[in-house]
Amino acid sequence: MLQADERRLVAWENRAEWPLTGLAVVFLVAYAWQVLDDGATPGVRTALEIALWVVWFVFAVDYVVRLKLAVNKPRFIVRHLFDLLAVLLPIVRQLRVLRLVTVLNVLNKRLAGKIRQRVGIYVAGVTLMVGLCASLAVLDAERHHENATITTFADAVWWTLTTISTVGYGDRYPVTWEGRLVAGLLMVGGIALLGVITGTIASWLVEKLSGVEEQLQRTDDALVAEVRSLRTELAELRAELNRTALGGQPLNGSAGPEHA
């Protein structure tokens, strides 16, 4: 049985999940606009920055509420480490994309179990989200540095593809500490993504095998029941034959042959 605080925590998370996902999407649009539109007017940039800080504030409030409702607070902190980083590291612009982990959480909770048979769609969606966030973050960190090799969004996407796939051609690489931090997180994310893919496929296979085993078990149970039924009928038939033989009465009480 869940304790009262745990029930409130689960209820809060269920209610806040989709609103936070919507805010994460708003954040992605605002952050992408801020990074890609290098010639935006000061007014637009101010509005985008305000939007990003509003999203950060809402995420911070959500984290504090969930931490307060959690019964085992140390375990909660460990299990929601990315959420904590997203709240504590707003100064590092490139790490603000950690807030989009909320979208991945919703995908994992709500969709993974429903689309295991379409694991390719699930994996592609997660990969696209991680790749887009990493591309925006590294471009934001690198493009204005004098020795930068990543100066356009195309460069950033190419670098992300080679990094997340662990190919690493080396023609594009981060030179700032922020960019290298993004690179490190992306490498870890690539390994984690591989684990997600493997785990999802394994779960799907186990589910399929379990279904086959359940079907075989139902078939076995039906056969056993049928055999038992036949044995019961055979025993009844033998008993009736014995009664007929002892009493001189024909089977099923039918009339015997007439004597002259």
Image (cartoon, grey):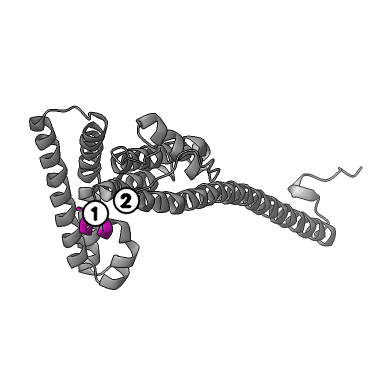
The magenta stretch spans residue 50: no
Residue drawn at (80%, 53%), measured in percent from left and top?
249
The magenta stretch spans residue 86: yes
Task: Give the magenta range.
Answer: 84-91
Distance CA(mark 1)–CA(mark 2): 32 Å
Lateral position of residue 102 relative to residue 40, left or right? right
The answer to whether residue 223 shows anywhere in this view is yes
Tell me the tag on residue 150. none
- Residue ID for mark 2: 178
- Residue 199 is situated, as x and y percent measured from the top left of the image, at 52, 52
What is the residue that sits farthest to the front in this orientation? 146
Q: On the image, which quarter does residue 221 sit in?
A: bottom right
The answer to which of 250 and 160 lies nearer the viewer is: 160
Residue drawn at (17%, 61%), measured in percent from left and top?
64
- Residue ID for mark 1: 13
Q: Disc 2 residue type?
A: Glu
The answer to which of 197 and 234 lies nearer the viewer is: 197
Give the class, few, some or many, for how many residues have Cα within 10 Å of label 1's Cα (few <14, many ≥20).
some
- Residue 238 is situated, as x and y percent measured from the top left of the image, at 79, 57
Q: Main secondary structure of the magenta part?
A: helix
Image marks 1 and 2: residues in contact by CB distance under 8 Å:
no
Look at the numbered disc 1 and give the secondary structure of its residue.
helix
Instruction: State the count of labels.
Output: 2
Lateral position of residue 251 relative to residue 225, left or right? right
Q: Disc 1 residue type?
A: Glu
Look at the numbered disc 2 and give the secondary structure of its residue.
helix
